[in-house]
Amino acid sequence: MVDSLFNPKFLLNSLSLSLTPRHSDTRKKEIKWMIRIIKRSSVKRSSLTAIFSSRTKPEMNASQEAHNREAFRQAVGNTLERRLFYIPSLKIYRGVAGLYDYGPPGCAVKSNVLAFWRQHFVLEENMLEVDCPCVTPEIVLKASGHVDKFTDLMVKDEKTGTCYRADHLLKDYCKDKLEKDPNLSAEKAAELSHVLAVLDDLSAEELGAKIKEYGISAPDTKNPLSDPYPFNLMFQTSIGPSGLSPGYMRPETAQGIFVNFKDLYYYNGNKLPFAAAQIGQAFRNEISPRQGLLRVREFTLAEIEHFVDPEDKSHPKFSEVAQFEFFMFPREDQVSGQHARRIPIGEAVSQGIVNNETLGYFIGRVYLFLTQLGIDKDRLRFRQHLGNEMAHYAADCWDAEIECSYGWIECVGIADRSAYDLRAHTDKSGVALVAHEKFLEPKEVEKLVITPVKKELGLAFKGNQRMVVEALEAMGEKEAMEMKANLEEKGQAEFHVCTLDKVVTIMKNMLSISKEKKKEHQRVFTPSVIEPSFGIGRIIYCLYEHSFYTRPSRDGDEQLNVFRFPALIAPIKCTVFPLVQNQQYEEVARGIARSLTAVGISYKIDITGTSIGKRYARTDELGVPFAITVDSESSVTVRERDSKQQIRVSVDEVASVIKEVIDGVSTWADVLWRYPTHSS
């Protein structure tokens, strides 16, 4: 299959076929440029087939490899746009970067992917599904940290004011030099590779220094750039006519689940573990959107928050996935310059590579979900976050990355977020988002008791009294006992108050700290959260590339595009074609269509007089897995898309046969064995 993907003849045909009057002049120039590049190419097909191998390094010029990736991407993208899988939004008004519309087949693919996601996760794991508003009050996102920290570093063209993401400019510069500069020294290449490796960890000052050192200017005008500065990615709005209640369009769906934890916990019978799930739109005001569906301003997320006891992160169904073996990329392998390797998930958990069973279980389930959708398992890996990528509160985090023509793309994040989110909302709202474990017998436990003397603290800190009290009460046991020792020895202690961002002096008369033994009937704790988060648009785009291939037409004079969608997510499951324009055949076709509707199978009926070969080609390009050709009144021909094999089935049976294969009850091989084959 990959051979045909990168056949230069195929790329030329696909690009030429994709060139339609509906394209803008700019797009037409891009396509014609790619056609010229391929015509000049002398790269052999055997080299091109290695482009997407994550473990094979093709012996080819890096510049040529980049050109061929771009040509393949254009061929896929133009086919998707021509067949209306997705198109730029507001096209007649010249569009808006980072916004896309899904056309009829794109909507169907997306709907099928989400339906399978619900089946695979929500139903299988008995999750609680919620649907929360997109508009979120500022206080919620202040508590979660998004208002202060949800930023990217931006630079401006100093003359035109055009904005760019600073890290993107530096990344593009480094990759461009590595791929296209034949005179690059080994020392300089190593330096640029190192910059790419640590890019996410560079501060604003370090990023600005590198941009100046390399002389990077504005891509469009070559004007000088400003120093990098943070830009909050959330769309701001106001709630109500007064404009006094600030809010934001949510950048993720998770916060709606966290703030509803108390009610969901009660709904679940006050039992842990349990999971809540949500599918919905999220919004990020990207500085410079690019890469089509991979980086957009409005997108669909499907997120799961699995709440678990922090002292017991085992999973009762872990044995069901423990034997799965797939490419994993632990942080130690990344740091030492090794490649991803196949590791059984059970082994990864037992060796401590993956933090716990519940996290490992969801990694296994995500692998199963993606491969059943049609993602190539050899171009899928799970990469562990490096130390500089990890949030300070996270226990472990892995990304499911899929390789496409843009490189390795993060499509699913699977993180152990510990108890950070529930604690943050508890502190901000004053509502305890906690779980309870009741003891069979009362237990004697030693409790830390911190009692601030509010009168003395008020005299000393006046308006800041509340923040000092809250910080003292939130102390951990180790910090509190150290303060107790200092107060007893010196009569005072230095204490850092995070909310004031300064160190204050606490006197002995302002606070009492002690340990008391108490009998308790239950344990109260804040649950940890395991979060798998799915970028649906990114998964779908990678699926398009992994499913796309070509094959020669019957006379061999052109290459025909095909999407190898599994029946599970194909936009249309079946087509119905009367072989010729004939009233009897057309009536049979309509009867079959009614039967397909009755069993819930989507179909497309085509009674035009176009040749059957052209009708097959049109629907193959939409990824339709089965075609029913009506060539008699009693039986019909059923054709399978990829093998092009055909069988004869009676008119009365055909809908049930298609249904059982679509639902996975039988395979095509099963029905091929049961029914007589047919030669076209």
Image (cartoon, grey):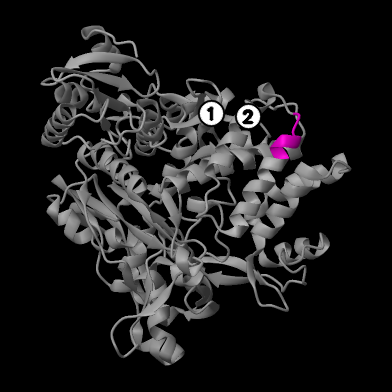
Residue lying at 80% horizontally and 47% vertically, measured from the top left? 191
* Amino acid type for the residue under numbered disc 1: Gln
- Is 444 colored magenta in this rendering? no
The residue pinned by badge 1 equals 559
In the image, 409 versus 386, the foreground residue is 409
| Residue 44 in picture, x, y percent from top left | 71, 24
Q: Which residues are magenta?
A: 37-42
Left or right of residue 387: residue 566: left
| Residue 477 in picture, x, y percent from top left | 41, 60
In the image, 655 versus 229, the foreground residue is 655
Residue 509 falls in which quadrant of the image? Answer: bottom left
**Is the stretch drawn in magenta largely helix, strand or loop?**
helix
Left or right of residue 447: residue 236: right
Residue lying at 27% horizontally and 11% vertically, measured from the top left? 672
The residue pinned by badge 2 equals 9
| Residue 171 in picture, x, y percent from top left | 69, 53
| Residue 476 in picture, x, y percent from top left | 41, 61
Quadrant showing the C terminus:
top left
In the image, 548 versus 583, the foreground residue is 583
* Amino acid type for the residue under numbered disc 2: Lys
